[in-house]
Amino acid sequence: MHLDVLDLRNFYYRTQLGRVAQRAIRDRVVDLWPVQSGQTVAGFGFAVPLLRPYLADSRRVIGLMPGPQGVMPWPAGMENVSVLCEETHWPLPTGLVDRLVMLHGLETSEHPTAVLDEAHRVLGPGGKALIVVPNRSGLWSRRDGTPFGFGRPYSMTQLETQLKRHGFTPERTCAALFAPPSSARFWLRTADFWEGFGRRFGPWLAGGVLMVEASKQVYAPTRGGLGALARRPLKVLEGVGKGVPEPAMNREADG
């Protein structure tokens, strides 16, 4: 089940550990997707902490928050861009979104199949999704004191397999949150060091979250309609141009 929006807000904006987690994941997102002007960027779940770098230059930024979680106005002191929605029906036209980020949206959903179907629907041609989920091998998924300790943690293989089943092509993978989920001063002050260390030696150090960038598969339409029918002979025209068949009785009489 989804976490309450107030608990998520308090963690990310009112605790030091939450601010460290927010910065680590957001920096990874910006590394993968540098800010570009004219794009429509959306987030589902509680992805708004990751969308702030895109507010200034994007054509539009939308924060989709599922009903079981609840919604809060965001960003503070600016025009609101967050909206409450059903997790199985997003209030967006098909093909509108260029970039879509999911955080605390897939692993806590009771309808992950429908969520991925909606993600596929709203992405336009060439659109990309970035899915962020707890790493089942990481320390963060084993601690209930953070949002990453709730829901279904994933392995990289599990996440990629699920994305492929819903029409996505995984392109790049990475991890974040290499520092332990501890509020001790030492770990908070050295969090940036551990993030840099983890990026260089990721296979030997499990990150707290897995991140998969996936593109939307768009298949070429099969040929049909009039063009397909024209290649097949029309049976109603069979026999045109041939002589009129002679009755059998006449052939017997001639014989």
Image (spheres, helix red, strand yellow):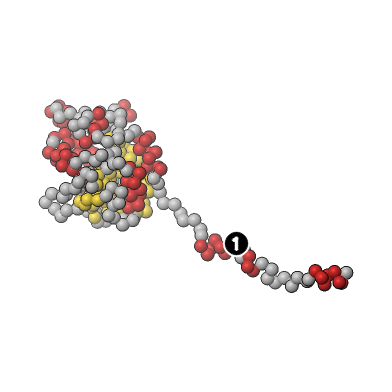
Q: Quadrant of the N terminus?
A: top left
Which residue is more in the foreground, 204 or 115? 115
Who's the residue at 33% across and 49% down the image? Answer: 118
Q: Is residue 196 visible?
A: no
Q: Is residue 181 visible?
A: yes
Crowding around mark 1 (Cα neighbors within 10 Å: few <14, some 14 to 19, many 20+) is few
Q: How far across and how far down the image is residue 237, in percent?
A: 64, 69
Q: How far across and how far down the image is residue 116, in percent?
A: 34, 45
Q: Secondary structure at mark 1?
A: loop
Residue furthest to the right in view is 255
State the image quarter where residue 32 is shown.
top left
Who's the residue at 66% across and 67% down the image? Answer: 238
Q: How far across and how far down the image is residue 52, in percent?
A: 19, 47
**Residue type at tag 1:** Arg
Which residue is more in the foreground, 248 or 50? 248
Q: How far across and how far down the image is residue 244, in percent?
A: 74, 72
Disc 1 designates what residue? Answer: 232
Q: Quadrant of the C terminus?
A: bottom right
State the image quarter where residue 92 is shown.
bottom left
State the image quarter where residue 146 is shown.
top left
The total of numbered circles placed on residues is 1
Question: Eyeballing the image, is 251 above or below 33?
Answer: below
Asked whether, in this view, residue 131 is left or right of residue 18, the answer is: right
Who's the residue at 39% across and 38% down the image? Answer: 161
